[in-house]
Amino acid sequence: MENSTTIDHDAAGEELRADVAGGSAIPMEELDRLTTDIVGALKTVYDPEIPCDIYELGLIYKVDIEDDRSINIDMTLTAPGCPVAGEMPGWVQNAVEAVPGIGQVNVDMVFDPPWTPERMSDEAKVALNWY
């Protein structure tokens, strides 16, 4: 099994970074750049019905960066019946594939745990007047 690094989010939307399977073969400086660039790419994708990016909304549950630089993303939607459910994974894939230095990108739609507004970052809550 290849090593990977995971960017994960807890229920409050706080970013957690964990090395999986004994660390990564990717140098730490490069891993930090990839992580920053991937998060930046995710922040360019917006839910068309909500004026906030999917990262700040807490729709990205997990991003695995494999040693071969392939990327596996688990994401969800604010509601399973979202009108762009079939399109949004492609938008995410296209955005992350544009990051220099990465390989194949796989996006999986998951609904467990279900998304709740508590997953939004403080930035998203302010933008949406949820305070």
Image (cartoon, rainbow, N blue to C red):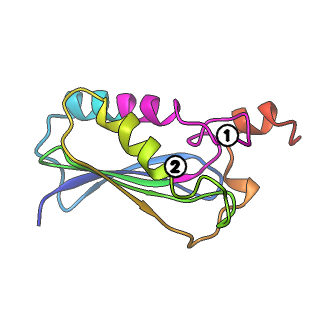
Kind of residue at disc 2: Met
How far from the left and from the top, in percent, is residue 109? 47, 63
Q: Secondary structure at mark 2?
A: helix
Q: Secondary structure at mark 1?
A: loop
Quarter of image, res 127:
top right
Which residue is denoted by mark 2 in the rendering? 88
| Front residue of this view, candidates 71 and 4 | 71
Q: Are marks 1 and 2 in contact (CB under 8 Å)?
A: no
> In screen coordinates, is 32 left or right of 26?
right
Give the residues in magenta.
Answer: 36-60
How far from the left and from the top, in percent, is residue 29? 22, 27
Quadrant of the image for the C terminus? top right
Kind of residue at disc 1: Pro
Quadrant of the image for the N terminus? bottom left
How far from the left and from the top, in percent, is residue 117? 75, 54
Which residue is denoted by mark 1 in the rendering? 48
Q: What is the distance, in whole Å, between disc 1 and disc 2 at their CAs?
A: 10 Å
| Front residue of this view, candidates 58 and 13 | 58
- State the mark number for residue 10: none
> In screen coordinates, is 71 left or right of 114?
left
The magenta stretch spans residue 39: yes
Pointer 1 local density, CA inside 10 Å: few below 14, some 14–19, many at least 20: few
**Residue found at the very far bottom of the displayed protein:** 112
> In screen coordinates, is 54 left or right of 120?
left
Q: Residue at x 14, y 39 (%)?
A: 26
The magenta stretch spans residue 4: no
Q: Residue at x 44, y 43 (%)?
A: 92
Helix, strand or loop for the magenta stretch, by majority = loop
Pointer 2 local density, CA inside 10 Å: few below 14, some 14–19, many at least 20: many
Q: How many marks?
A: 2
